[in-house]
């Protein structure tokens, strides 16, 4: 298996633009997680899905952020409108089985820079 | 809200030395996880702990779930250059939300 796939790997955009980050989890995994990592705030869990259904979105910073999982093999994290403080590395991870008892496999991340 | 204090923030050691890092909190956690992140990559789970007092090893790594459920430590024995990276603790408490420590950056001098 190719592991968790994220695209794009790098994104540079201007403030106010819409940003869409994409994730393909490992085939067969039933949990998908979105994380954000910054120097100031460290690693934060934004939202996670189980069988394509959002379970906990309490980490989503504000209404400008939205995440969807239309099917088992694809998820998006959208920021609209983007702001400079959204600059971060966004990771997607997937796992199978018990949510916090099983290993989460992280993708390589999307490095977002909002100017 | 729940917070984790991870220390030290960074370490610079000689190859072959043992390393110890820990995470503490004023809140109780039900699960402790330890991750390692290499530059430009996502975190990789090293060890997971589920019971107070639990001591678990993974090769040269050993981690313990504190008896008070408010702390955890990670030890690395006989460090090697490939141990370089950032180590994160993460705790799962009654809120059901996974909280991460700020990370410990480890550098190993050959």
Image (cartoon, helix red, strand yellow):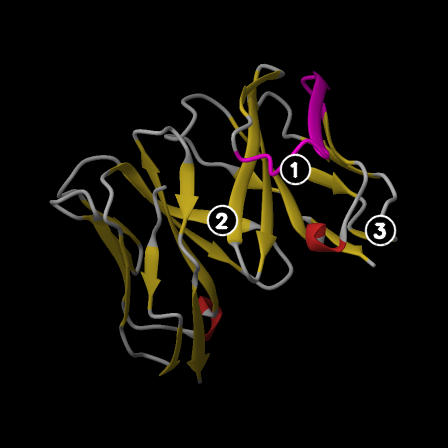
What is the total number of numbered labels drawn onto the structure image? 3
Viewed as shown, does residue A54 lie left or right of B82? Answer: right
Assign the C terminus of chain A to one quadrant of the image.
bottom right
Task: Name the disc covering residue A15, or none.
Answer: 3
Numbered disc 3: secondary structure: loop
Query: Looking at the image, is mark 2 or mark 3 nearer the viewer?
Result: 3
Q: Which residue is nearer to you in this view: A100 or A1?
A: A100
* Residue visible at 52% across and 55% down in the picture: A41
- Between the C-alphas of marks 2 and 3, the distance is 32 Å
Numbered disc 1: secondary structure: loop
Residue A37 x/y as whole percent: 58, 52
Mark 3 neighbour density, 10 Å: few (under 14) some (14–19) many (20 or more): some
Pinpoint the chain carrying mark 3: A
Mark 2 neighbour density, 10 Å: few (under 14) some (14–19) many (20 or more): some
Numbered disc 2: secondary structure: strand
* Residue visible at 71% across and 38% down in the picture: A5
Residue range (magenta): A59-74
Task: Name the disc covering residue A4, or none.
Answer: 1
Task: Give the image quarter of residue B78.
Answer: bottom left
Residue B98 x/y as whole percent: 42, 38
Viewed as shown, does residue B47 lie left or right of B57? Answer: right
B64 w.r.t. A6: above or below: below
Marks 1 and 3 on same chain? yes
Residue B9 highlighted magenta (yes or no): no
Marks 2 and 3 on same chain? no
- Between the C-alphas of marks 2 and 1, the distance is 12 Å
Query: Looking at the image, is mark 1 or mark 3 nearer the viewer?
Result: 3
């Amino acid at each position: 298996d190719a592991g968790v796939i994220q695209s794009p790997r790098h994104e540079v955009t201007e403030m106010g633009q819409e940003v869409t980050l994409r994730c393909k989890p490992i085939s067969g995994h039933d949990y998908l997680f979105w994380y954000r990592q910054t120097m100031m705030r460290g690693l934060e869990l934004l939202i996670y899905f189980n069988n394509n259904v959002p379970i906990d979105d309490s980490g989503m910073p504000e209404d400008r952020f939205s995440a969807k999982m239309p099917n088992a093999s694809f998820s998006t994290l959208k920021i609209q409108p983007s702001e400079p403080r959204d600059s971060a590395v966004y990771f997607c991870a997937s796992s199978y089985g018990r949510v916090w008892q099983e290993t989460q496999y992280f993708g390589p991340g999307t490095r977002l820079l909002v100017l | 809200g729940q917070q984790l204090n991870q220390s030290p923030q960074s370490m610079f050691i000689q190859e072959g030395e043992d390393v110890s890092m820990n995470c503490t909190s004023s809140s109780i956690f039900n699960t402790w996880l330890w991750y390692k992140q290499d530059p430009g990559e996502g975190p990789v789970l090293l060890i997971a702990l589920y019971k107070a007092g639990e001591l678990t090893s993974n090769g040269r790594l050993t981690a313990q779930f504190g008896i008070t459920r408010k702390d955890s430590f990670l030890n690395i024995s006989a460090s090697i250059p490939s141990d370089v990276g950032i180590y994160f603790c993460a705790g799962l408490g009654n809120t059901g939300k996974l909280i991460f420590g700020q990370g410990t950056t480890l550098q190993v001098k050959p």
